[in-house]
Amino acid sequence: MRLHAASPDPMPNPVAGIATLDEVLSHNAFRDPDGRALSNATLPFRGTWRETNRAVSALAETFAGWRLGPDAVVGVQLGSGPEAALTCLALWRAGLIAALLPLPWRRREMTAALAAVGAQAVVARTEAAGGRPGESACEAAFELDRLRFVATFGPDAPDGATPLDHLLDSAAPSAGERPDRPDDAADHVAVITFDPAATPIARSHNELVALGLAPLLAGRLGGGDRLLSTLDLAGLPGLATGLAPWLVTRATATFHQPSTLEALIEAARDATHVALPGRIMERLVADGAFEGLSPKAVFAAWRAPEPRLSAPVAVPGTEMVDVIALGEIALVASSRAGPARFAAVPLGPFAPEGLAPLIETRVGPDGRLYARGPVCPANVFASPEGAAVAIDAEGFVETGFVGVADRAAGRVMLGGRRRGALQVGGVSVTQVEAERAFAAAGIDGSVDLQDDPVLGARLRLTLKPGADALSADAAALALEEAGFGPALFPRAVVAEPARRTA
């Protein structure tokens, strides 16, 4: 599926090529078959490029056997583990599109997103993030007529789901390449991520490579390096600091699903580059997580405007690269000028290392921040249901943020939180969506945000006068039983003071 640019004269992509990312994997396997591609102890195969390519082909054969048709959309809810990267590559090799679902989503959020893109299948974990995504996928399939297949990684697959783990250690029946791949396949849609209100944002293979270019250049990631990625691939930071740089540079990658501090330290022991959520850096440094470690660079991933709410924390002797996502619309990445100052959001065209610009920003007269360029969506995904991103005649997309243009310094000083959206960790939701979720759970109240040292923010629920009193745990349980994920669970519940009358 190739989507044509909404602007008649879009900014050129300086890294556009003809190879899709699964073809890049094949090239890596041909050039360095015995080189280490993946370093995950949980994988049942040797992590060489040859074996990784074989595992992807085995998965692709199964996906192609579903006979969904070219460019069918498949939901992927696998977090930051290696199975997420392998599944994306296999879907592309089978001629399909990956719609990436954040791991904390449950049935309600998942169903809305899958309906918005007309998904025909889902691949999920059986257990993760305190829930059972595989069961949520089966429940979504019961609600959506188009959803024909559910497949899972992990033990105890739910009834009706196809287990995939055994395919990682089996031989592929064929080479796994699509015979009908068009000449411009790298410009076709590869992934869909979601902005609030289940708004699908589609990106091509070439746009994914552009996303990863600024982080890998700023962090000087190369073929002999070892990259630890802890970020969910269902968002720009995970794609830009994990999947795309790994394939393009032929580095060795560890895709790690965080569980405990000890497990994270062990995974980072031999890493030269580490990608982490920026908000947990202060806690990790305070807990001594980097003692004895000496990575060349740390990619600190932020969801704007989180840097405004945090203090910059540096790891001595390590290059700090701030990767700032403006929702799912745009992403900027650059090294810090000093350990005590975050990298800035640039104003105007931004080109790392003297290349052609990857992004251009502008601030409108009303303070609204707009962006365009190879790292931004250049087209509108035709959604069967749900909202669509708006792109003007010059290719600029409104990010939802406001800012002040500092033209002397060439940067944008971001204002407050994104207009109408609530950001909890890697999950964004509109305030209307959040309040509808509470109403669906039988809770009468309004929501706002409280700062959180790890997730960036958490919801606070204010009960309406006359509503039954309940605790934060009771509200979370009600939301969970109604099919909503933990991003909506309130940190605190307060009562709205009764209005006095004369």
Image (tube, helix red, strand yellow):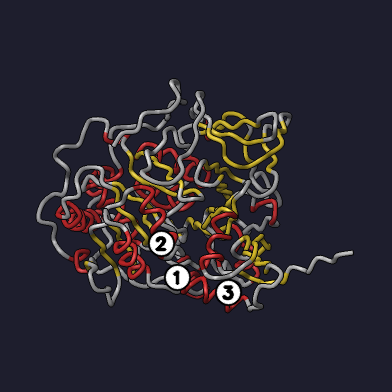
Toward the top, the furthest residue is: 9
Q: Position of residue 149 (x, y in %)?
A: 23, 60
Q: How many marks?
A: 3
**Quick one: label 1, few (<14), some, or many (20+) residues within 10 Å?**
some
**Are dots 2 and 1 in contact, CB under 8 Å?**
yes
Q: Disc 3 marks which amino acid?
A: Ala
Q: Which residue is mark 1?
A: 129
Image quarter where the N terminus lies is top left
Q: Secondary structure at mark 1?
A: loop
Q: Is residue 82 above or below residue 334?
A: below
Q: Disc 1 marks which amino acid?
A: Ala
Kindly identify the residue that appears in the image at 59 percent across and 63 percent down.
455
Circle 2 or circle 3, nearest the eye: 3
Q: Which residue is mark 3?
A: 475
Whether residue 41 is visible here, answered yes or no, is no
Q: Disc 2 marks which amino acid?
A: Gly
Q: Position of residue 288 (x, y in %)?
A: 61, 71
**Quick one: label 3, few (<14), some, or many (20+) residues within 10 Å?**
many
Q: Secondary structure at mark 2?
A: loop
Q: Which residue is mark 2?
A: 79
Whether residue 289 is visible here, answered yes or no, is yes
